[in-house]
Image: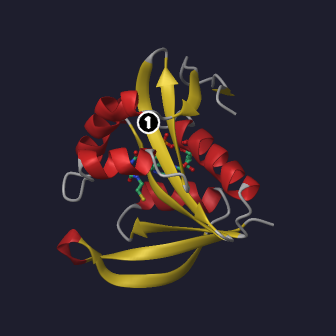
Amino acid sequence: MTDARIPRDAKAAFTASIRIATSSDLDAIMAIERANFPDDAWSRDAMASELGNPNGRYLVALDGDEVIGYAGLRAVGDQADVQTIAVREDHRRRGVALALMRELLAEAASRGAETTFLEVRADNLPAQTLYARLGFVAFTIRPGYYPGGVDAIVMQRRMR
Ligand SMILES: CC(C)(COP(=O)(O)OP(=O)(O)OC[C@H]1O[C@@H](n2cnc3c(N)ncnc32)[C@H](O)[C@@H]1OP(=O)(O)O)[C@@H](O)C(=O)NCCC(=O)NCCS
């Protein structure tokens, strides 16, 4: 699992690997986190705590030695939640998020999850498209869940 190759695609000469995130990745993860979630970025302490949570699994995608994306899962009992995912803007549309998500879903299944949930902003079409492609379907709405009053769409995916 820790070195899943992301296939080189025709439109962009690119390869990356995925491995489990460690505390040494915190600086790089936080830089991507702050760039992508300016209104509600997690604090460094919160991210460090997530990385160390035994119920969690956080992954980084690498281009060479450089962290270009990350994603995290929490799995407890028969439910898992995708906690976060972000890919650096200059590495988007190359299958990095798909590869991260597939690894997280495999991890959720191996921990016994029967359903995986996530929340996504109602105005975040790229992420919704990504999740739909992986078999997630809208489950319910949390009105005004995000800063600025943006709704959250809760999506779920049955694992079998
Ligand atoms: C959403 C995000 C993680 C996608 O990362 P990515 O590595 O570019 O995604 P991928 O290249 O793996 O895309 C896989 C598929 O998702 C869909 N997708 C991804 N970005 C999309 C976009 N901007 N518009 C439409 N569909 C998109 C497409 O179906 C895509 O397949 P395709 O490129 O063959 O059409 C990235 O845009 C990001 O980091 N956004 C900011 C943070 C964020 O919104 N995170 C999610 C919070 S819920």
Element carrying mark 1? strand
Left or right: 78, with 117 as reference point:
right
In this rendering, would 64 be left or right of 45? right
Residue 56: x and y in percent read: 53, 53
Q: Is residue 3 above or below residue 78?
A: above
Q: Look at 48% across and 46% down and name the residue there.
A: 71
The residue beneath circle 1 is 69
Q: Alpha-carbon neighbours of circle 1 within 10 Å: few (<14), some, or many (≥20)?
A: many
Q: Is residue 6 visible?
A: no
User: Label 1 is placed on what type of residue?
Assistant: Gly
Q: Nearer the viewer, residue 98 or 85?
A: 85
Q: Residue at x 18, y 72 (%)?
A: 148
| Residue 27 appearing in the image | yes
Residue 143, quarter of the rendered image: bottom left
Q: Quadrant of residue 30?
A: top left
Q: Residue at x 26, y 52 (%)?
A: 37
From the top left corner, tell me how far across and down residue 130 is, in percent. Answer: 55, 54
Residue that protrudes farthest toward the right in the picture: 160
Q: Is the CB–ligand 1 distance for label 1 below 8 Å?
A: yes
Q: Is residue 147 left or right of residue 100?
A: left
Residue 62: x %, y % from top left: 49, 25
Q: Is residue 64 left or right of residue 132?
A: left
Quadrant into which the N terminus falls: top right
Q: Nearer the viewer, residue 141 or 13?
A: 141
Q: Quadrant of the C terminus?
A: bottom right
Compared to residue 129, the image places residue 153 above or below, namely below
